[in-house]
Every structure is written in structure tokens, then in C-alpha cells.
Amino acid sequence: MVASVALAAAVVLCLSTSTTLAYQVSMQRLLTSPILSSANSPYDYNFNAAYLPLVGGNVSGIPIDCLAVRVQNIVGVQVPSKIAIFCESGDRQTFSRDPYVVIDPSQSPAQADGCEDPRVVLLPDGKTLIMLYSAVNLVPNAARSKLSLASCNTAIDPQCRSWELHGAIFPNIFWSKSGAILIRPEGAPHFLFWGDTNISIATTTNFYNFTDTATFVVSTRSDFFDSALVEAGPPPLQLSDGNHIFLYNSARVSSIPNPKPGWDLEYNVGYVIVNASLKDSTLPVVVERSSSPIFSPVLGWELCDTANMVPGQTPLVVFVEGAKPLPGVPNSFLVYYQGCDTSLGVALLHVDV
């Protein structure tokens, strides 16, 4: 995979944060319990899920959603994380207990120590799914993460059991992760939102080769809820006015007591509204950014703090990677989120345009 990268002189896109926002954005839980956890999965931890378009079919006329989920067994002997596909049972609340692994550490030395955090987009050909994920391997004194790409042709493999691995998007960067693609009109370069701490922009014309622009589209803000870290959410979602809402994950320092030694962060969800419709524009234009979180850890299985004592890998975390439009309901989306790096929940995102 070929990439042109120049991160040393990164530029931050200008953005004026206003307390008066043109878009009204809400995100509400549809259930108070996890939809996927160790209670209905063969894995100890089931989190960071991507929605899979075209996969799943229907049962008695009811569409069935399928998710690509980061899974891991840690209780007893710890094993590296994998990416497995789970499909709904048909009631919108439970998933099949028979998932199948599609991205595995054994497939490449570059991911020998973990396959993490998938995000999936359907290409304009209407049949090819692109998955971006983090390939992790341990090197002396450090872990290396490389944002990597896999593809599946749903016309040949409708259940997406076999994915072709294409390797690292930025092979010369030691640490890269968290990629979400925004597909633009034909003839315009497509955008890749990627990275953590700050979110950068890369461009592509073919979805397999990417050029980094050395520009941050979303950066941390010292006086806001996203002061410690920002990281990509799902692929940006198009709104009825032609703009896109891009959900992002964020962290800030928290004093809430929790049982994890040394852990002092809380993760919340924010958003930016992006204008990416101009064909001659080489960069997306951020027209609005949330001044406060639209989603925060509230329930016991999202907090996993000292007061609740619900077990979880990482306390005080909600994190999003998967979303889909609700058919027939403009500007409304089903969002799959995780709590405490442990279990999955579902929420409704709505935008008043």
C-alpha cells in the first residue's frame, strides 16, 4: 500500500466554536442493558463494533443487522483480540451466539498481537466493503499499531466470511489507527479521517492508496470536554442538507474514583458538521462543532467506577465506531457504542437540520 505522509508540519483547520449552534443533535439510548456482552457471546469482551451494510438479509421480512466486533478473551489466559461478525437474532435486542472470526492475528505477523477497532464503508460500486482496522504487534519496549485495510466483495461472499488483507495504509508511520472514510461525489477525492490524540485528513481516489494532507480536521481543545484526546467515530453520515455529521470520541481528565490503577480519563462523544460537497475542495470544511458532549457514560456498565463496581476493562468510557441511517426517517441514525471496553449498546442519533 502506497502513502505520501508529511506529519511534521500539521495544520489545524480553522473553526469558530459558538454557543449558538445551527444543528440540534441528540443521542439517546434505546436500551439500558448491553445488546452484546459475555452473557450472550462466547467472548469475555465484545466492543468497538462496525456496522456491515448488505450483510445479514432478513428474517420474516425484518432486516437483520450484522456487526464486525472486536472480541477478546482475557479471563484466565489472555489472547490477542480478533474481529468477528455477529448478526441479530431478529428482535433488534439480541445477537446470535455463533459469531465467525474474519480478521485474526494469525493471518499476518503485522497483527500478531491484536486486530482492533473496525470501521466499515460500502464503496460506490454497491458491492465492495472496505474495513479499516488497527493491526497491532509488539516490538522491543513498545506496541506498534498500523491502520490497515481489508476488503470483501459481497456479490461473491454475501456473509463476508473471507476478507482480502491489503496491509498498512501508512506503512512508514510507527503508530496509526482509527480510520473513517467519507465518500464524495464522483471525480472528487474521498476523505479519510484518521488518528488519535488529533484527527488528521488523508485523501484517496481509489480507496486503496492514501495521501496524508498533514492537516488536523479535529484537534483537542484545552477548555472543553475533548481536552486530552480526540479519535474518529464511524464513517461520516450524510444529512438531508448535503452536509455530513462526523461523530468523534474524546477524552478528558476525570477525578471519578475507579478501580483501574492509574486511570484518570473519561471518554465522551462529540461531533462536527462537515461540508464535503465541493468537488474542487481538497479539504473538508468544518461548519460546526459540539461545545459539550452529546453522549457520556451514565449507566453502571458504562461507568465501571468504584461506586457501581460493574466489572469492565476501562472505566468511564463510551465509544462509537458503527452507525447506520434509519430507513424512511431523515437525519436519524442507529448508533452502536461500547461501554468500558467491554460490552455493546445501541442508541438513536437525530439531527435537526
Image (cartoon, rainbow, N blue to C red):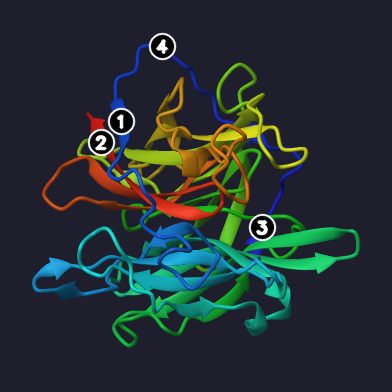
Quarter of the figure that contains the N terminus:
bottom right
Side of 245 relative to 58 (left or right): right
Instruction: Specify whether residue 219 is in view.
Output: no
Q: Are marks 1 and 3 in contact (CB under 8 Å)?
A: no
Residue mark closest to the camera, 1 vs 4: 1
Q: Residue at x 26, y 46 (%)?
A: 333
Q: Give SS at disc 4.
A: loop
Nearer the N terminus, badge 1 or badge 4?
Answer: 4
Classify residue 299 by image quadrant.
top left
Three-letter amino acid code at the position of disc 1: Ser
Q: Give SS at disc 3.
A: strand
- Marks counted in the figure total 4
| CA distance separating discs 2 and 4 | 19 Å
Nearer the N terminus, badge 1 or badge 3?
Answer: 3
The residue tagged 3 is: 4
Q: Residue at x 44, y 31 (%)?
A: 286
Up the image or down, 203 lies above or below 260; here it is: below
